[in-house]
Image: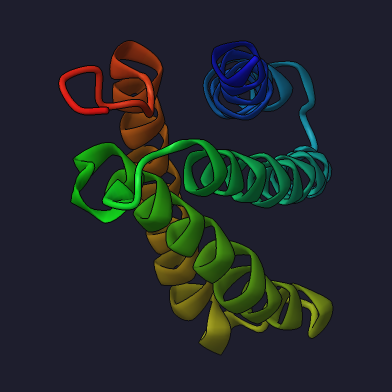
Amino acid sequence: MQTISERILLTVWIGGMWMVGFIVTPTLFHLITDRSLAGTIAGQLFNITAYIGLICGSLLLLNVLVYSSVRFYTNWRVWILMVMLILVAVGLFVITPMMSDIRDAGMPAVEKARFDLLHRSASVLFSITSLCGLVIVIFGLQDKTKS
């Protein structure tokens, strides 16, 4: 049962991330001429994906804690999962609100550079999380060499 739930949670979280980040968002910006509207829609999709990530990642971590041996902390995969959760939380609860504040203020020219920096930071965090997720999808969370 542990493997099945792990696979489902990883599919929902990482599959959703890759779909939104690398397929849906570029398609939005290609099809919608109003970049502000495309950005707003993409932002909402990224927020939804982040909440899904926090839920699925927390359940995956709980799954590992419940079903693994006492030494779960020696499993490098668990550390990657925790890094992923931290990156998602930073993006969702730190960077996104800062970007929203700038956008809500009407994106004054003075703040444009700050918004662009925050946007690049969010993109980097998302890319790192996506790659870490791919590693977890490939190797799974369970250390098959230990019991």
> In x, y percent, where is residue 66?
56, 45
Q: Residue at x 66, y 20 (%)?
A: 5
Q: Residue at x 49, y 49 (%)?
A: 65
In the figure, is residue 68 to the left or right of 61?
left
Q: Quadrant of the N terminus?
A: top right
> In x, y percent, where is residue 76?
20, 43
> In x, y percent, where is residue 144?
24, 17
> In x, y percent, where is residue 71?
26, 51
Position above or below: 26 against 131: above
Q: How many marks?
A: 0
Looking at the picture, tell me which residue is in the foreground, 120 or 5: 5
Looking at the picture, tell me which residue is in the foreground, 104 or 15: 15
Looking at the picture, tell me which residue is in the foreground, 32 or 59: 59
Q: Quadrant of residue 107?
A: bottom right
Q: Quadrant of residue 63?
A: top right
Q: Quadrant of the C terminus?
A: top left
Q: Quadrant of residue 103?
A: bottom right
Q: How is the image coloured?
A: rainbow
In the figure, is residue 83 to the left or right of 22?
left
In the figure, is residue 60 to the left or right of 97?
left
Position above or below: 86 against 1: below
Q: Residue at x 51, y 70 (%)?
A: 90
Position above or below: 34 against 9: below
